[in-house]
Image (spheres, rainbow, N blue to C red):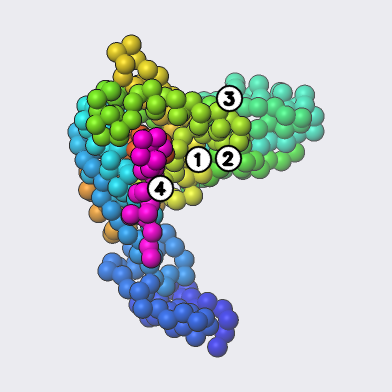
Amino acid sequence: MSDKIPRSNSDDYTADIIAERQQFIEDKTPARLDHTKQFSFDPDSMAGNVEHLFGVAQIPIGLAGPLLVNGEHAQGEFYVPMATIEGTLVASYNRGMRVIREAGGVTTTVCGEAMQRAPTFIFRSARDARDFRDWLVANFDAVKAQAESTTSVGKLLEVEHYIVHNMVHTRFDYSTGDAAGQNMTGKATFVACEWIRSQIPYMRHYLLSGSFDTEKRTSYVNSLKGRGRRVTAEITLPREVLGDVLRITPEQMHYGYGISTLSAFMAGSSNNAAHPANGLAAMFLATGQDAANIGEANQCTVYNYLTRDGDLYFSVTLPALIMATYGGGTGLATQRECLEIMDCFGPGKVMKLLEIAAGVVVAGELSLGAATRVDRKTGTNEWVDAHEKLGRNR
């Protein structure tokens, strides 16, 4: 039997070719496929999402909520599907959502939008690079027209430019509607760059992506300029709510985050939060997002202070939150159902989903931030106790 994975050039998603790959796996590896090969939806629907399809990975999905959101797009209570294999995660976020609900809801604001492709243009000298930078600024409208000729949705908002040596590093910043937009911006920027190349004979060459977009990675530039959408979620937590639900005071919570912020700075961390990636990854998997975008989305800052009334103001800003309600994996059967639970499937719903996701991050921060404190009277720790009770699959 050939070592080459079976594939059909005419239709690679038929039952026959999938069964052939399943048999190939059992013949070539120690595995026996009792579960991965079972799924309930049409394999043709996965075309464009995966190659060499042989089955599915079934991940448990839990439900947290209701989460009360006072957003501009998400308003009211939402139940949130979270796909995870980490015991205690759903319970912890559920507890944080109770705190938010009893405090009157979390206020969410989408503050910016910019999905990038970041070509680098190379010249023979810094002077040529400077002249090109000036040309790029003067001809923005023409570049914009070229880029937008490829899409009915994407809009070129800005072209950032940074001269280094004999190179001009750029970031073509787009709005992308309800799609995440990486493929959309790649095609649009390529067409624009080819037109630019025809206009600039003194350009040596260019790279379509010079890595300055830092796709699927944390970076200082994304923290400042954003990638995807910049979203802030904020709440004022009454003293009695923190005490009743989390058994912690505003002073204790503020003190703990002061220490963790210093620790994050010393460690060179990309954020001073406790675990934003936990909630976001669980939502990404449940709703068909590109899971690797956690690399950007995890980057955030936490800010809190004691109010004059003795309560706690608490805020999280996510500068690079990349999510979609249309396209990509959002249309797959189980992922669509999870989006529909939050009424977030399809066009016109992405801002709503982003605001819900930001509220979920706040819920997780509040719950874990309180749980890591050691109770000096009892000598117990909620984080350890919860994982012992819920998080150990023996």
The label on residue 264 is: none
Q: Quadrant of residue 207?
A: top right
The nearer-to-camera label among 3 and 2 is: 2
Q: For the C terminus, give its image quadrant.
A: bottom left
Q: Position of residue 160 (x, y in %)?
A: 58, 27
The residue identified by callout 2 is 214
Amino acid type at image mark 2: Thr
What residue is shown at x 42% (from left), y 24% (from top)? 254
Identity, as a three-letter code, of the amino acid under mark 4? Val
Q: Nearer the viewer, residue 63 or 322?
A: 63
Label 4: how many Cα within 10 Å (few below 14, some 14–19, many 20+) = few
Circle 4 or circle 2, nearest the eye? 4
Residue at the disc numbered 4: 384
The answer to whether marks 3 and 2 mark residues whose Cβ atoms lie closer than 8 Å is no
**Cα–Cα gap, marks 4 and 2:** 36 Å
Query: Badge 3 is on which residue?
Result: 139
Q: Position of residue 363 (x, y in %)?
A: 33, 36
Q: Are marks 1 and 2 in contact (CB under 8 Å)?
A: yes
Q: Given the image, on which type of amino acid does mark 3 rest?
A: Asn
Which quadrant of the structure image shows residue 161? top right
Of the numbered discs 1 and 2, the one sitting upstream in the chain is 2
Tell me the residue that label 1 is attached to: 296
Query: What distance separates the C-alpha of mark 4 from that of mark 3?
Result: 59 Å
Quadrant of the image for the N terminus?
bottom right
